[in-house]
């Protein structure tokens, strides 16, 4: 391939697959070790690639972390958007979204990553990115449900309770959320 030739479709697909593979490896590594302690060498090892290849895909460790965060939040948004199909009221929409959340947080790696992203908010760039993503999540839940700000706030409070009780393996505390209506 010459310097001016465009990559083939197969090459682009392979690069996209590698990028996805690196993001998944990064989610796992950041989930266990946090942003600061995770290394690109460990991420590369998890992905089965060389460390320099990570930098061919992502300009920096920060960019990789933010891409991983986008992947995790994107999965939540996609699940919520699918959940509200057919909802008949704001309460029904919130309940449908809430009932999908246990399956999302049952993936301990993704849940730990979410919590690590919040913990890494001491870094101004991570804080700004995480705040924008969280605000987008709140805005989407509000728009998808049509619920009041108080109901949306309660929905997210329940979600945060679910995050903490799931990661600490205290399911009985959150059980009332899954046994009936998510909101009072």
Image (cartoon, grey):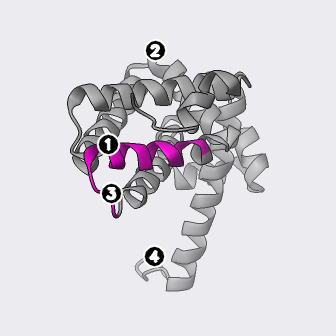
Camera-side residue: 176 or 110? 176
Q: Position of residue 119 (x, y in %)?
A: 54, 19
Q: Residues within 10 Å of mark 4 (few under 14, many from 20)?
A: few
Q: Mark 2 sits on what residue?
A: 122
Q: Position of residue 140 (x, y in %)?
A: 28, 45
Q: Is residue 53 left or right of residue 151?
A: right
Q: Nearer the viewer, residue 27 or 97?
A: 97
What secondary structure characterizes most of the magenta part? helix
User: Can you identify the residue that label 3 sits on?
Assistant: 87
Real-space Cα separation, disc 2 to disc 3, in angstroms: 38 Å
Sequence-earlier tag: 1 or 4: 4
Label 1 SS: helix
Q: Residues within 10 Å of mark 1 (few under 14, many from 20)?
A: many
Q: Which residues are magenta?
A: 86-102
Front of the two marks 4 and 2: 2
- Determine which residue is flagged by label 1: 91
Picture layout, residue 79 above or below residue 146: below
């Amino acid at each position: 391939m010459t310097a001016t030739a465009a990559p083939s479709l197969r090459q682009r697909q392979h690069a996209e697959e590698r990028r996805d593979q690196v993001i998944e490896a990064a989610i796992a590594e950041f989930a266990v070790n946090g942003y600061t302690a995770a290394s690109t060498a460990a991420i590369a090892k998890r992905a089965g690639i060389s460390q320099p290849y990570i930098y061919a895909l992502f300009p920096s460790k920060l960019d990789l972390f933010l891409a991983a965060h986008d992947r995790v939040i994107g999965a939540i948004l996609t699940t919520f958007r699918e959940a509200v199909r057919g909802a008949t009221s704001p309460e029904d929409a919130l309940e449908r979204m809430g009932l999908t959340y246990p399956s999302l947080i049952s993936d301990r790696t993704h849940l730990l990553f979410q919590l690590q992203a919040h913990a890494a908010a001491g870094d101004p760039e991570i804080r700004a990115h995480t705040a924008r993503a969280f605000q987008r999540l709140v805005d989407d839940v509000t728009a998808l449900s049509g619920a009041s700000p108080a109901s949306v706030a309660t929905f997210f409070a329940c979600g945060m309770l679910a995050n903490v009780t799931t990661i600490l393996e205290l399911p009985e505390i959150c059980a009332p959320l899954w046994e009936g209506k998510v909101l009072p």
